[in-house]
Amino acid sequence: MDNLIEISSKVNIKSMTVLTIESIHSIFDKLIPIFNPYSHYFYWKYPQYELMSRLARFINAKAHYTLYGFTTILDIIYSYPNSRLKSKEYWLEIIQSWFKTQANKNNSGENNIPAVYGRASLKGQIVAWKCVFPIESKIKSKQFGFTNNTESSMRIRIREALTQAITYRDTSIKSWIDSLK
C-alpha cells in the first residue's frame, strides 16, 4: 500500500490536475465554501475570489430574481477593476428592459405584484394586489385589497392599494438585499 501511495505521489508531481466545474451553482455551493478557509493564499487573485464570494451570497439567495437585487449584483461587479467592453449603463438598460417586459405581463404592470381575483359575486374582478417574493427571501407575502363601491371610487382605491403594494415591495426587497451585503 505504501508503494502505491509513493508511486501516485511521484506521478502527481510530474503532472497537472485539471478541475472542471460545470455550473455556476457548483461554484457557489461547492467550490467557494471549500476555498474559504484558504482564501488568504490567493494573494493577487484575492479580489476575484472576494467578488465570487460576494456574488455567491446574492445568487444563492435568489436576489437576482428582483430588479433591485440584479442591479446590486451589477454594482458589485462594476466596483471591481477590470477591462470591460460594455458600460454598466448598457447592462442596466438591458436588465430594466427585461424586468419591464416581465412586469407588463401582470395586470398591475409591476414585478412581484400579481392581481388577486374575487370569488362568488366578485368572480373575475380584481379585488386586491398581492406582493410575492422569492421563497429564499423569507419576506412575508402581503395582500392589499380594496372595496368595490362605485366605479369612480373603485379606480382611486385600486390605485391607492397598488401604491401601497409597490411601497411594501420596494422597502421589503431593499431591506432584504441590503442585509445580504
Image (cartoon, rainbow, N blue to C red):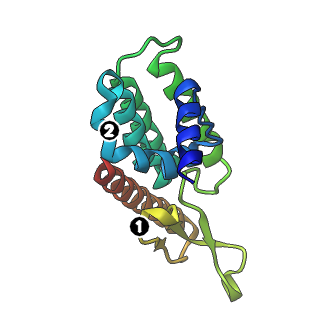
Q: At 35% across and 56% down in the image, what residue appears?
A: 176
Q: At 70% across and 88% down in the image, what residue appears?
A: 120
Residue 87, given in percent of the width and then of the height, sits at: 47, 15
Crowd tier of the residue under label 2, counting other residues whose Cα lies within 10 Å: few below 14, some 14–19, many 20 or above:
some
Q: At 42% across and 49% down in the image, what residue appears?
A: 34
Residue 69, given in percent of the width and then of the height, sits at: 43, 45
Is 112 above or below relative to 126?
above
Does dot 2 land on a helix, a strand or a loop? helix
Counting every numbered tag in the picture gives 2
Decide which of tag 2 and tag 1 comes sooner along the chain: 2
Q: Which residue is mark 2?
A: 39
Task: Kindly report which numbered mark, 2 or 1, lies closer to the viewer in this rendering.
Answer: 2
- Three-letter residue code for mark 2: Ser
Please state, as top left, top right, bottom left or bottom right, where the N terminus lies in the image: bottom right
Is 131 above or below relative to 18?
below
Location of residue 151 (image quadrant): bottom right
Is 24 above or below relative to 170?
above
